[in-house]
Image (cartoon, grey):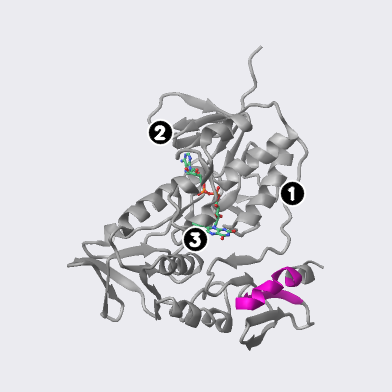
Amino acid sequence: MPTADPLVVVGSGLAGWTLIREFRKLDGDSRIVLVTADGGDFYSKPMLSNALAQGKTAAQLVTTPAEPMAAQWKVTLLKGAKVSRIRPQGRRIELHGSEAEQPYAKLVLALGADPIRLPLTGDAAGEVLSVNDLNDYRIFREHLEGVETVAILGGGLIGCEFANDLAGAGYRVTVIDPSPYPLAGLLPEPAGKALLEPLGRLGITWVFGKAVQAVDRANSGCRLTLGDASTLPAERVLSAVGLRPRTALAAEAGLACKRGIVVDRTLQTRDPHIFALGDCAEIDGQVRPYVLPIMHAAKALAQTLAGQPAEVAFPPMPVVVKTPACPVAVLPVARDAAGAWQTEAGENGVRMRFLTPDGRLIGFALTGGRVAERMAMTRLLAS
Ligand SMILES: Cc1cc2nc3c(=O)[nH]c(=O)nc-3n(C[C@H](O)[C@H](O)[C@H](O)COP(=O)(O)OP(=O)(O)OC[C@H]3O[C@@H](n4cnc5c(N)ncnc54)[C@H](O)[C@@H]3O)c2cc1C
C-alpha cells in the first residue's frame, strides 16, 4: 500500500510549531514534514528585543532545540532546507540545491516576514543591522562588543523596545524617525509622547521628524546623514523600520498576494490544498504580525486540517510594548474609525479611550502604571 502524502509545514517559527502542536492534539498519527530554512529550534521571538539587558546569548533564548521538538510532535524535520518553488498542480515543493521534491497532501506556509531595508546610500549602508531571528540576534551581539553608541532607525514598537533594552544594557542610544513622536503608527500623540521622558532618563536621545539618508564609515564607526543634511555619529546602526511578509514563493505559484499571502478565515489560499498563517499571511485584508493572532489562527487551522473545518475569530487583542521604562498597552483603532479619543493624563501615566459617536469603547492606549487596567479594558471591549 502506498503511504498517503504528508501534511507539509514550511517554517519553524511560532506559526509553524504552534500549528503542529495544535494539530497533534487532534491527530496523533498522520505524517507531518516540517521544512525550514533555519535550524528549527523553538524560541520566543519577542525575547529578541528584551534579552540584551538580561545578558542572554542567542543559545540561551532557545526554549527547546529542534530535534526534541520534532520527536515530541512526531515530525520529520528537514532543517536548513529552503523551499525554492511550490508546484500546486503536482502538489510538490522544490528545495534549494536539491533534486528531490517533497510531495504534500496539504501545504501550510508559515514563512514569516523580512525586515524592510531602507534605500540608504553611503559606504557603510550595507553594515546596517536588523534583528528578526536568532541568528540576527547572535550577529548583533557580536557587533556590540566594545561598542558604546548605537543608532536605531525607527521609533516604532521594535525600535523602542530595542532602545530600552540597549539603554538598559549600558549603551548610549539615539532613535531617529521621520514621525513626530515614538510609536506614532500605534499610539495617539499624548500616549506616544508619554515615552519621551522616561526613556530619555535612561540616556536615549530622540531625533524626530527626520529620516536617515546615508550611512558612511567614519573614524570610530559610522556617520549618519539625515534629510536636512545634519549628521550624527554612531558606532553601530540598527534598522527597525518594519517587516514585509514573505510572499514571493506564493506569488510565483499563482496564489493571490496583496500585503501578505491572501487567505480566508479558514486560512486557505485560493488553492484548496494550500494554507498560510503567521507574519506572512493576510487574513480578511489584514496582516497581524503578533503572537496572539498566530495562536488563534493555529488553533482554527489545526481543526480544519484534522477534518473539522473552522474559521478563525479574533477577540480584542491589545498589543503590549516591552519598554519597561514606560510600559505601553494599546488596542489600536482604524485611522478612519468614527469617534474620538478621550485622554486622562496624570502621574501614574496616560489613559486614552476611543469612543464611537454612540459612546461605545472600541480602542484604548495605556502607558506607565495605567497599563494595569489592560485586562479590565479588554473585558469591557469584548462584552
Ligand atoms: C524583535 C521582535 C519583537 C517582537 N515582540 C513581540 C511582542 O512583544 N508581542 C507580540 O505579540 N509579537 C511580537 N513580535 C512579533 C512576533 O514575534 C511574530 O509575529 C512571530 O514570532 C512570527 O512568527 P512566524 O512563525 O509567522 O514567523 P517567523 O518566526 O519569522 O518564522 C518564519 C519561518 O519560515 C522559515 N522560512 C522562510 N522562508 C522559507 C523558505 N523559503 N523555505 C523554508 N523555510 C522558510 C524561516 O526559516 C522561519 O523558520 C516581535 C517580533 C520581533 C522581530
Q: Residue at x 45, y 62 (%)?
A: 53
Chain-order first, disc 3 or disc 2? 3
Q: How far apart are marks 3 and 1 (CA)?
A: 34 Å
Q: For mark 1, what is the residue?
A: 311
Q: What residue type is labelled 2?
A: His
Residue 366 is a magenta residue: yes
Q: Is mark 3 on a helix, strand or loop?
A: loop
Q: Furthest residue to the top?
A: 1
Q: Name which quarter of the figure residue 147 lies in.
A: bottom left
Specify start and end residues of the magenta stretch as a single range: 361-377
Checking the image for residue 96, the label placed there is: 2
Numbered-mark total: 3
Image quarter in which the N terminus is found: top right
Can you tell me whether the CB of the residue at mark 2 lies under 8 Å from the nearest atom of ligand 1? yes
Q: Furthest residue to the right?
A: 383
Where is residue 39 drawn, in percent x and y? Answer: 46, 38
Q: For mark 3, what is the residue?
A: 50
